[in-house]
Image (spheres, grey):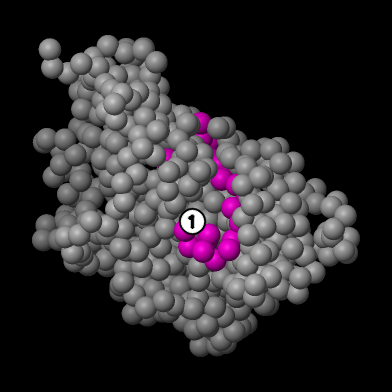
Amino acid sequence: MALTLDDVKRIAELARIEIAPAEAGEVLTRMTGIFQLIEQMQAVDTQGVAPMSHAQDVILRLRDDAVTEVDQHALFQSLAPQLEANLYLVPKVIE
Amino acid sequence: MPPSVQSAVAYALMLNLTLKQLAAELASKRVSSVEVTEYFLNRVNGLGKTLNAFISVDAERSLVAARAADALRAKGAAGPLTGIPVAHKDIFCAKGWLTTCASKILSNFVAPYDAHAIELFNQAGAVIVGKTNMDEFAMGSSNETSYYGPVKNPWNVATVPGGSSGGSAAAVAARLAPAATGTDTGGSIRQPAALSGVCGLKPTYGVVSRYGMIAFASSLDQAGPLAKTGEDLALMMNVMAGFDARDSTSLERPPENYTRDLSKSVRGLRIGLPAEFFAAGMAPDVARAIDEAVAEFRKLGCETVEVSLPNMKLSVPVYYVLAPAEASSNLSRFDGVRYGYRAPEYGDLADMYKKTRAQGFGAEVKRRILIGSYVLSHGYYDAYYLQAQKLRRLIAQDFVEAFKKCDVIMGPTTPTTAFKLGEKAGDPVQMYLSDIYTIAVNLAGLPGMSIPAGFCNNNLPVGLQIIGNYFAEAQMLNVAHQYQQATGWHMRMPEGIA
């Protein structure tokens, strides 16, 4: 598998990271090197091996459906880049 | 020197005191927490600046905590770490402290709450002496990806301290703080501990809560302590380990006293030596130091057995699929909407996200997000992500087999001693391979530690890695402590730091 500049552009779009056209070549070179390392995985036959997603076989805990948090919206929203009437401001999404 | 310190000798000696000794000084009331805190703050603001080991220092806030600790002691309510300054990696949210994760995107983020580990240190009466520098979002092995610039290794300022917990390791090595916290996703406690000549422990996954610890790769991230001795690591673990319902992977286990086995004999202990750890790639003088450390354990009555970890060679490629995949998901929260940096100029919402993230993240973080997005994307998931998860199981099973023949596994923490600043910064793959001996432990979720085990020809420290079975931290600390009763490497200090 060989990564292309189009792949880099597509992934950057998925990841919501702007990549200037001048940077794209460098990104492609670095990622190609990393994928050469990653490709070593393909040499191993893993048929029948169960994927391991977690270090411990634990069952997700359930808790009582009760309010456990206190309202701290003023504190948390004080960190926002742009705020008005307790609402986070972003560019207009719907015309 | 503050005039309130009664003995100039005691003051000068504070430099190299262990946590246990410092606690005894405080308990005897020969020094106060305010005096100890001022002493280390002076070091942080002096040598600490030269080394660039800290991102945030807030002397007034630290001294408020020190006065509170002294008051607690006056009431007779002091615990083992009450009044002791501890440096925290800037990945831990600490209420009221700038908490940046060494990223521009969080460069204005004052944490509105405490991480569980921070809560526990506060409850224990420990004093936050500052937030340490690190690789951006813990992605790096040299501390060179930090938005705040690289940390210098106190043993040789032309070399790196390791990473990602490079500031914490350098702080302990340069005696800027008697102990520090770190996090370890692929070696980020053990590798800098080795390169900086200090002790570091990555506990079993799930032992320390991840709540309030800024996430990198959630199935691998684990917090742990860095300090001068195995005994000090045990004292730190007694504070920071424990169940926390706010971390869904925190393990519900009865509390442990990690100092309980320190003084046990290690006679008869079976040490597994994996052939794969001693293969080509390790520098010859690192190999010599590790051989000498193993010989010391034989003198202490331990047996050595050969074990095999045949899939370990795949741990680096597997890690560079799984960790970026998890990171690409975790770091999607940094969008410039609710907190953190937002690009000053943008068009529509998508443009705001893209510019904010392009400007807010450094090159290595962006690379990993892109890799993660790719391996999780349609058509590539099975070939990369699923294959990596299957290999993760094979790597973990290797350890299960190995621990049938031995009690602990030993080998080098890193293939070489500290490398030069800039030497690997331009080549991500070479940088990734410096974690070749540590990553498999995270994939398996096992506890691992690094302790100083001598020096190479270049006078840089070598780390011995000790890997234990699940929940064997107390036993590993026993092994480290017994070695440190017989050897003196751990109390060596870099020249010129006093």
| Residue B404 picture location, percent across and down | 33, 79
Furthest residue to the front? A85
Image quadrant assignment for residue B479: bottom right
Identified at 62% across, 71% down, the residue is B78
Image quadrant assignment for residue A26: top left
Q: Amino acid at mark 1?
A: Ile
Image quadrant assignment for residue A84: top left
Identified at 66% across, 64% down, the residue is B71
Magenta stretch bounds? B118-147
Identified at 66% across, 45% down, the residue is B60
Relative to residue B183, is residue B347 depicted above or below?
A: above
Answer yes or no: is residue B6 visible: yes
Q: Which residue is mark 1?
A: B118
Q: Between residues B103 and B416, which one lies in front from this camera angle? A: B103
Residue B223 falls inside the magenta stretch: no
| Residue A57 picture location, percent across and down | 22, 67
Answer yes or no: is residue A25 visible: no
State left or right for residue B60 relative to residue B386.
right
| Residue B11 picture location, percent across and down | 82, 60
| Residue B310 picture location, percent across and down | 32, 62
Identified at 70% across, 48% down, the residue is B41
Helix, strand or loop at mark 1: helix
Relative to residue B235, is residue B405 depicted above or below?
A: below
Q: Between residues A32 and B488, which one lies in front from this camera angle? A: B488
State left or right for residue B96 relative to residue B54.
left
Q: Between residues A83 and B35, which one lies in front from this camera angle? A: A83
Relative to residue B177, is residue B361 depicted above or below?
A: above
